[in-house]
Image (spheres, rainbow, N blue to C red):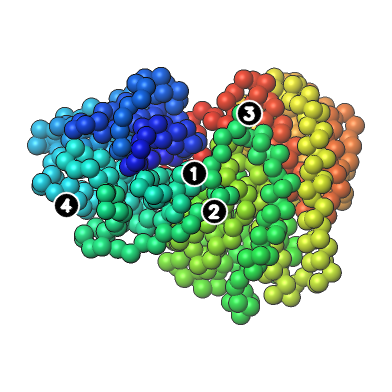
Amino acid sequence: MCGIFGMIGANAVGNTLQALKYLEYRGYDSAGVAARVGDEIHIYKSAGRIQNLERLLPKGVESNIAIGHTRWATHGAVSTENAHPFYSPNKHFAVVHNGIIENYLTLKSQLSARGAKFSSQTDSETVAHLLQSNYSGNVLGTVLATANSLVGSFAIAVTSTYDSNLYAIKNKSPLVVGVSGKCVYLCSDIRCVSHWAEKVAVTPDETVVVVGDKGVYFFDFEGKMKEVSFFTTDAAEEMEQVDGDFMLKEIYEVPTKIRLAKEGYFKDGGLNIDSETVRRFTRIYLIGCGTAYNSGLQIAAVARKLIDIDILPVIASEFIYDSYPCGTDTLALFISQSGETADTIRAAEKVRKLGGYTYAVTNTKTSQLSFVCNKVANIYAGGEFAVASTKAYNCQLVTLLLLMLDIARIRQTLDDKVYAEIVDGLDALPMAIEQILSNSYEIATIAEKVKDSSAVFYIGRTCDYPTACEGSLKLKEISYIHSEAYPAGELKHGTLALMEKGVTVVAISTDGELKEKMSSSMNEVATRGADVVSVSPYTFQDALCITLPKVHTALYGIVSVVPLQLLAYYVAKRLGRDVDKPRNLAKSVTVE
Ligand code: M6R
């Protein structure tokens, strides 16, 4: 949700443009660059995709200092005037910002009372005005004064004509600093910085960063120097570019990544909570948003059969404002691919405050969420850049399941034989998923029919209901077809009224004992005119059948979602959608 970049070093404008292409997954409403050219700052910005910015950037702008931005609009419409960077009125400062300045209306009215004129509707422009108004002849002092008047979440990069440093202010929005020889980079995403930097540092909250000829310095908001350590980056964390769609590439990576998720879990030592603490827990929350919530829903359905305490999946934004019981007897697992999702981080902060044990399950071990939580499990999905999450979901399921199995063993509610069957069963999944992928043309053919549906309902019972939720989310977010998921038995309590010709129902049915019940649900919708697609190891009359390979019952969720990921992808492609960057969305949702 907005990406910022800044650098000091050769080819600053070219590299900033390149970085913005990497960061575009964070927002694609507009993009812009500010470059120090001689004694001036030149700003180039445009609404829409990076290509629009690229077209208006003059070739070969010579600059050693540049900052850039990709926007996901929060305050102010999608327009060039609301695009970052923003000048201060005297053009001596330029800023880019990711986050929300919560007190911007107060600041704006104070500045307006002193005659300031704003050119945008954004909260971010306030920062540029504040810098000018606070300028005292010393840029660091000015940046510190500005930092102290801001409330909210922000990663801000600042360039000024008064000196040749680059500055950043960071609180609650991600900011990584990278160094390679004489070049220094500021960026929202560690994977992007890893592309250039040999060493990186994750900037802590309430920090001002100064990048200059003499190196990189970190200060708290009082101006006291801070020690922040740099570490060598992992090549696996580098960002990539692909010729086709990231989403399809990422679905095809599922078999490899789930293998890595399992290996990584054991390599990292498993659950890593002492047995006495685990026995003390009386409830487990699985908290996340969107796809991450669905993975919690899925694992809760599996783990309820294995563990003797309450296991509750909760949507993070609901957890923050509701009154779920929580104390020292509570384990809360926070699931987030990015580790940046504001709702999930706020929920983790709440659990910490209430004395609960917080555990991050994330794809980004250096993320804000990881710092908030007591423990972190890495899901090892590798960089995921399509807005629609795919491989991260499968890897979340593997990691969460292994965590639950460890808890069950410590609490002695799972015998060794069943444990071994499930853990060994994981090894069969990559091949099972390869089998589905090799038949993707069948799913593409079904997509051809589904694409004309007026609405698509996904149904399933118990462990298949979360898969229905995830399939439905995938379809609606990238195809824009109306879609809902229901427990199959619930249809007859209202939703059946919507069944008619033109509607498609996708039925997930992996539990042999519930097969007949699912068959009845399919008949009920088919007799009312809906087309039915089944996703199952069994076949059903009058349905287009996507056949699943047989796997351990506890593991079906990891496999049965793959045809649904492919179905969503092919439907969206056939409708001509931008599958990697669906309208109105962004990959990281860093605002509540
Ligand atoms: O980075 P997170 O896992 O915390 O993101 C949570 C959701 O925003 C995310 O899963 C979203 O629902 C995806 N776009 C779904 O494909």
SS for tag 4?
A: helix
Mark 3 burial class by Cα count in 10 Å: few <14, some 14-19, many 20+ = few
SS for tag 1?
A: loop
Q: Position of residue 145 (x, y in %)?
A: 18, 51
**Foreground tag (2 vs 3):** 2
Residue appearing at x 54%, y 29% in the figure: 582
Q: Which mark is residue 195?
A: 1
Contact between labelled residues 4 and 3, with CB atoms less than 8 Å apart: no
SS for tag 2?
A: loop
Kindly report the distance in space between the C-alpha atoms of the residues bearing marks 1 and 2: 10 Å
Residue appearing at x 33%, y 64% in the figure: 227
Mark 2 burial class by Cα count in 10 Å: few <14, some 14-19, many 20+ = few
Q: Earlier in the sequence, mark 2 or mark 3?
A: 2
Left of 493 or right of it: where is 386? left
The residue wearing badge 4 is 141
Q: Earlier in the sequence, mark 4 or mark 1?
A: 4
Query: What is the quadrant of the N terminus in the image?
Result: top left
Q: Residue furthest front?
A: 181
Residue appearing at x 81%, y 66% in the figure: 420
Q: Position of residue 315 (x, y in %)?
A: 54, 50
Kindly report the distance in space between the C-alpha atoms of the residues bearing marks 2 and 4: 35 Å
